[in-house]
Image (spheres, rainbow, N blue to C red):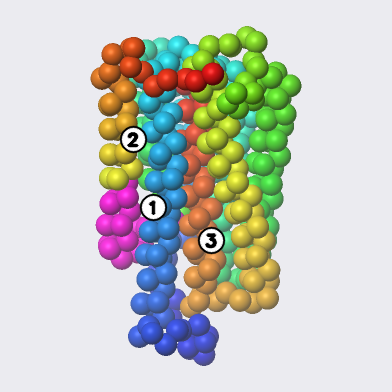
Amino acid sequence: MSEPHLSARTYLFTWIALVVLSALTLLLSVAPLGPFHVPVALLIAGTKGVLIVLFFMHLVEQRSVNRVAVIFWLLLLLILISLTAADVATRSLDLRPPVSG
Amino acid sequence: MADATLHLRDHYEDLAKQTHAARLGMWVFIGSEALLFAALFALYAAYRIAYPASFRAAAAHTNLFLGTAMTFVLITSSLLMANAVLSARLARPGRSVGFLAGTAGLGIIFLGLKAVEYTEHFRDGIFPGAFYAFARLPAPGARVFFTLYYFMTGLHALHVAGGVVLLAWLARRAHRGGFTPEYHTPLELGGMYWHFVDVVWIFLWPLFYLLR
């Protein structure tokens, strides 16, 4: 027997959501957001990523241990990026990462 | 059931457990791929914080139109890929082959657009690392931006190219009737890989094209 699975309609709606969010990213990139450009763009990109992981990659229909695996590596990824960024952001300008040559 | 026993390895009790193990293994593999890219994203974050003005100026010199087109190409290819797996689940292998061919076609279009873009940059003297010779943006921060640009989009493009080869192999196997509603694990895992590559591009797009 084949397992219960997502339908073509779900995939179409996921795609429409991805297109709308991409258009939104494009619009907001020219909006006067000041210092919020980067966080807003990353938030929308993250939302698109979650939609793809849940529906296109079928995480929503799989057993919960798979979700644990994904949450675990997402956590590692966030620690890696945020601590690297925090390190540089809290240094004095003289100590910023060098560019050789 | 004949099909199920054909693909069942003897160290698994049943096909459901084997399929579950395969999916979990794929998530672990994708996690290691994500961490590979995460190291580069961390590097981007560090240098963007150190050279914010250069990064914004350099991002204004990438081709926004091509970058955006590539975003929509990949998102649409993901929709086709999801439908290729669905067709196998609904016992329609012919449609599955069609969707796989469409997905691979969009992957090739993506690589073509990338090639056009790199050619444009080369003409301007934008090369990675020590070969950087873009007269309009001589600042060291801009050089780092474009070095990261080549490294990250290049590594991503290699993944797309590998994905296209994988899709061709899956299409051949689907064409020969290799996938059924009970057993289509290679197709499903191949799809997960393709979607992952799409997710990476979703983050590359704003960082290299939009945040100017």
Amino acid carrying mark 2 in the image: Ile
Give the residue at x 50% y 76%. Answer: B183
User: What residue is disc 3 on?
Assistant: B190
Vertical placement of residue B183 versus B99, above or below:
below
Quarter occupied by the N terminus of chain A: bottom left
Q: How far apart are the two marked residues, 3 and 1, measured between alpha carbons?
A: 15 Å
Give the side of residue B117 with respect to residue A43, left or right: right
Q: Please say whether residue A12 is visible from this viewpoint.
A: no
The residue mark sitting in front, 3 or 1, is 1
User: What residue is disc 1 on?
Assistant: B31
Of B208 and A6, the residue lying toward us: B208
| Label ID, residue A81 | 2
- Which element carries disc 3, helix, strand or loop? helix
Give the residue at x 46% y 84%. Answer: B8
Q: Which residues make up the magenta segment?
A: A57-74
- Which element carries disc 1, helix, strand or loop? helix
Judged by its main secondary structure, the magenta piece is helix
Mark 3 surroundings: few (<14), some (14-19) or many (≥20) residues within 10 A: some
Measuring from the top left, give residue B207's x and y in whole percent. Answer: 47, 28
Give the quarter of the image for residue A78: top left
Mark 1 surroundings: few (<14), some (14-19) or many (≥20) residues within 10 A: many
